Amino acid sequence: MAFDVCDARSTAVKEAEKPSAEMQPQYPEQELSFWERYAVRALEDRFGELGFGGAEVKLPGDVKGGPEQSAIEIADVAEDSMWRQAGLKTGDILLEVDSEPFFSGKDNLDVLYQWLIRELRTKPKTYSLLVIRGGKRIILEAQLKLGPYN
């Protein structure tokens, strides 16, 4: 009896497809299950609002970056926010948070918020903020953490 390599490969592929199919996400991309939504809402409850507002702007001319990169011009900073405690001010141009840049055409403040609620823990962590203020680059340090459940 001859051993057929093609049949063996075909059988192996069929066997490998079974667990692969079981590991496929059950929900379309960007759609969360009930429990995932529950977990995200619990984190949002502990973080609240972002604490500052702003608008996307092009990178200043003297800042190196890819054509897809942008920055956030800070329009307001909440009085009691961790951002204000770090020294962030209205008019600052925020280039990066913890070495993470911003990208053109994205809802950068929402992306930052979603990243932070997944990143933060109860214990404070220091995040660096690369800012341009008055034409000069400065680095601010923000102590960010999740708050208590409301």
Image: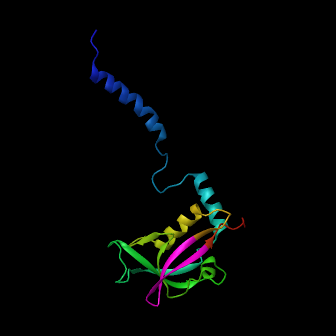
| Residue at x 32% of width, y 26% of height | 9
User: How far from the left and from the top, in percent, is residue 76?
Assistant: 55, 85
Q: Quadrant of residue 48?
A: bottom right
Residue 70 appears at what percent x and percent y? 39, 76
Residue situated in front as seen by the camera: 115 or 128: 128
> In the visual, does 76 lie left or right of 100?
right
Q: Work out whether 27 lies above or below 124.
A: above
In terms of depth relative to the viewer, which is nearer, 127 or 23? 127
In this view of the protein, which residue sits in the foreground, 38 or 77?
77
In which image quadrant can residue 144 be found? bottom right
Name the side, left or right, on which 75 lies relative to 4.
right
Stretch of the chain drawn in magenta: 127-142
**Residue at 27 percent of width and 24 percent of height:** 6
Task: Where is residue 7? Give x, y as percent.
Answer: 30, 22
Based on the picture, tell me whether residue 129 belongs to the magenta stretch. Answer: yes
- Which of the 4 image quadrants contains residue 21? top left
Q: Is residue 91 magenta?
A: no
